[in-house]
Amino acid sequence: MANPARASLSHRILGGDLRAAARLMRKADDRDPSAATELDALFPHTGRAHVVGITGNPGAGKSTLVDMLMQTFRSSGRKVGVVAVDPSSPYTGGAILGDRIRMQRHAADPGVFIRSLATRGHLGGLTRSTNDVVTILDAMGFDIILVETVGVGQDEIDIVKTAHTSVVVLVPGMGDDIQIMKAGILEIADIFVVNKADRPGAERVVAELGTLQNILSQNEGFVPVPILKTVAPSNQGTEELATAIDNHRSTLTSNGKLADRDRTRLLETVWSIVRESLDLRFKEVFDVRDQADGILTRLEERKLSPHALAQELVAALLARPK
Amino acid sequence: MANPARASLSHRILGGDLRAAARLMRKADDRDPSAATELDALFPHTGRAHVVGITGNPGAGKSTLVDMLMQTFRSSGRKVGVVAVDPSSPYTGGAILGDRIRMQRHAADPGVFIRSLATRGHLGGLTRSTNDVVTILDAMGFDIILVETVGVGQDEIDIVKTAHTSVVVLVPGMGDDIQIMKAGILEIADIFVVNKADRPGAERVVAELGTLQNILSQNEGFVPVPILKTVAPSNQGTEELATAIDNHRSTLTSNGKLADRDRTRLLETVWSIVRESLDLRFKEVFDVRDQADGILTRLEERKLSPHALAQELVAALLARPK
């Protein structure tokens, strides 16, 4: 090998070293420049894992559901990675403690890997960090990667878009059909799960989802998706969910759409890296112009409009088209 | 006037024409090129309105609370604008019907204006559209602008950051303190509201918020904020909320932080416009390179890594630093 020192982390990862994997994840998350080289070395080994997005409102019981799902896939001999994306406090960080607690239960099992990511305020940063973790786990031979996201924002929708299979988790009592519409994730679901299905109102949520799907079926290209019921802590319905995920992959493979989803994944990864670079460069250009022309003061005094300033900055940022 | 035909919409808006305002909002939302000129003409007349962000999970009763708050401010003689940001279906659009229903109740009152915005998938697009509506209402002399957002994603956090005062709405029974942490909005709240406070568990949410604030008080610079209880449909507590909002503005004015928040608002507006331009330009550059070099195929075949491709595209996009 030409440069064994630099390639060593990725080399160890390809050999199954989980500690090396955790180390590269931290480096990638910290945007350590050496991480890109390692990720590039892993990239040719990716493309086999099935990436499953699990999303829903806070309180939907996603973590427990993901734990049970992980165990179900493990018992069929598959290696399972979990990425828990938690857009929690941009100030306090969060997310890391829960991780340790969850990992301890599986400490002796090298077929399980759990990693939490918290937002740190940079735009698209979560999508990028998520994809980096998926790349590492995929290259290591993890068969299933469960990406758990909270919430309904654009960032979460972007992350869900990069999954091969998207599972949307709802619970009884958190809202009627309008709330489901508001969740903004109706059309991106490949599988619906009504969790906490032992609570009153579960049947009503299932019925409402069915009705909504009937309405949407009038739209061209809309395909109704399975609606499952689970009670995560007592493991009810998780085997059916695992089967539904496997079936969805089979369908994607046979109708050729797996390649489309894979392409979307890769393009989202590229765009998230580009976006972050542009964000940094924008801040540089802004500071230079501000020192030269006092653009910030002129903006605050309403003498320079946001549109005019934006145009000026974009012109300064971009290369002339050739 | 040099060009009365082009300036007419903004001119009519400054004269108080609500239909002209609605028309410009639609044009701005559609990214009609003429909208920027009109918004530029309005911009020098802005900077007087107080922008209040109201955020919380689906089902928190925000719409009703906003309606009541609007009436409270109206009864003190102030003009109130509402921007309801609804990151609903990226496919079906949504949001518009509810708007009409809400507006009808105030059809005879020129001191009220309600506008809903739905996400349309373009990154940062909601922040930009929201700021355009705020600019128009501010220039028209609306005193209070309530920006109602759903959810906990980065896009919503960006929008909330552009408010002078941020109100975070919680409800009993939707989760314990961990859920509150997950909402990711604890530190951005200037005022907490526990809505549906007639339900069991309201006191517990208030107590938990108090405890969390005590913990966070150990962080330097953290200032505890008011925790209010409301029952929106019966108008309980909304007058106290209106007073708390007014008090917050007074505090910001006297400690000089109003200018900071205004600056953040303006910079977010500039950045949202820049981001959108860069996004479009990126897609152009990508297509050109793909036709020339087949980058997409090379990416799919794992022969070109996302990091390498992103670097190449950024280099093609950006002007050389001078």
Image (cartoon, coloured by chain):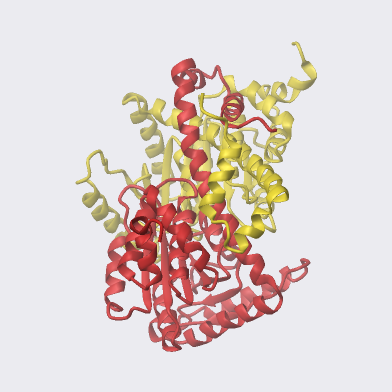
Chain colours: A yellow, B red
Q: Residue at 56%, 41% (x, y): give it.
A: A314
Task: Determine whether, in the image, residue A284 is placed left or right of residue B12.
Answer: right
Relative to A320, say whether B253 is above or below.
below
The image shows residue A208 at horizontal and vertical percentages of 28, 58
State which quadrant residue A206 falls in.
Answer: bottom left
Q: Residue at 65%, 39% (x, y): give it.
A: A281
Residue furthest top in the image: A1
Q: Residue at 22%, 50% (x, y): give it.
A: A214
Q: Is residue A47 visible?
A: yes
Seen from the viewer's position, the closer of residues B159 and A303 is A303
State which quadrant residue A172 falls in.
Answer: bottom left
Seen from the viewer's position, the closer of residues A183 and A108 is A183
Relative to A252, say whether A316 is above or below.
below
Relative to B25, say whether A161 is above or below.
above
Residue furthest left in the image: A218
Seen from the viewer's position, the closer of residues B299 and B181 is B299
Q: Is residue A72 visible?
A: no
Seen from the viewer's position, the closer of residues B175 and B79 is B79
Relative to B219, say whether B322 is above or below.
above
Task: Determine whether, in the image, residue B138 is placed left or right of residue A88.
Answer: left
Quarter of the picture containing the N terminus of chain B is bottom left
Q: How many marks?
A: 0
The image shows residue A54 at horizontal and vertical percentages of 47, 46
Quarter of the picture containing the C terminus of chain B is top right
The image shows residue B287 at horizontal and vertical percentages of 44, 25
The image shows residue B82 at horizontal and vertical percentages of 41, 70
